[in-house]
Amino acid sequence: MPVAAGPLVLVVEDEAAVRSVIGRTLENNGYRVLFARDGEEGVAQLEQHVDDLRVVVLDWHLPGAFGERTFDELIARKPSLRIVLVTGDHSAELGETAREHLACMLLKPFSTAELVLAVNAVLLA
């Protein structure tokens, strides 16, 4: 359950260690954080928190519902949602919806400072 009082961020990341570091970093910087291990969980979290959710940190390479499909589903449900895409694939090709709605992309490995700057920037945009 989120413990901070700031904006609500959803972290959709299949790697538990990465998900934990991202979540802890955001919580330490005043954000409330929800977690999802895959795209299906991410969409379900959005549906449960659609009014409060401001930003999604989304891994582009997810099992099952891949990042692009998840991205499209999230935007279809909440077009104003801000998405910070994270990927280790420096040649990741984005579909039309992702190109139109992408707030920011971080290439793995990224620093915790880069993560916080990215989330702060998309919330201020």
Image: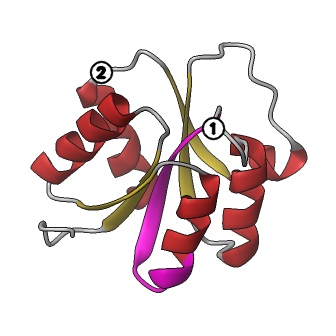
Residue at the bottom extreme of this rendering: 51
**Residue located at (43% from left, 32% from top):** 15
> Mark 2 highlights which residue?
111
Q: Quadrant of the N terminus?
A: bottom left
Res 52 visible: yes
Closest to the observer: 27 or 66? 66
Residue located beneath label 1 in the image: 62
Given the image, on which type of amino acid does mark 1 rest? Leu
Whether residue 116 is visible: no
| Residue 81 covered by magenta stretch | no
Along the polypeptide, which appears first: circle 1 or circle 2?
A: 1
Residue 70, percent from left and from top: 70, 54
Circles 1, 2 touching at the beta carbon (< 8 Å): no
* Residue 73 shown left or right of residue 2 in the figure: right
Mark nearest the camera among 1 and 2 is 1
- What percent of the width, then of the height, locates residue 34? 34, 62
Q: Please rate how many residues cluster around mark 2, counting C-alpha atoms within 10 Å: few if below 14, some from 14 to 19, many from 20.
A: few
Residue extending farthest to the right is 96
Residue 99: give its label.
Answer: none
> Which element is circle 2 on?
loop
User: In percent of the image, x 72 and y 49: which residue is there?
Assistant: 65
Q: Where 108 sits versus 117, above or below?
A: above
Point out the stretch of residues depicted in magenta.
Answer: 47-60
Whether residue 63 sits left or right of residue 72 in the image: it is left
Residue 36 is situated, as x and y percent measured from the top left of the image, at 45, 55
Amino acid type assigned to the residue bearing label 2 in the image: Ser
Q: Indicate the quadrant where residue 22 lies.
A: top left
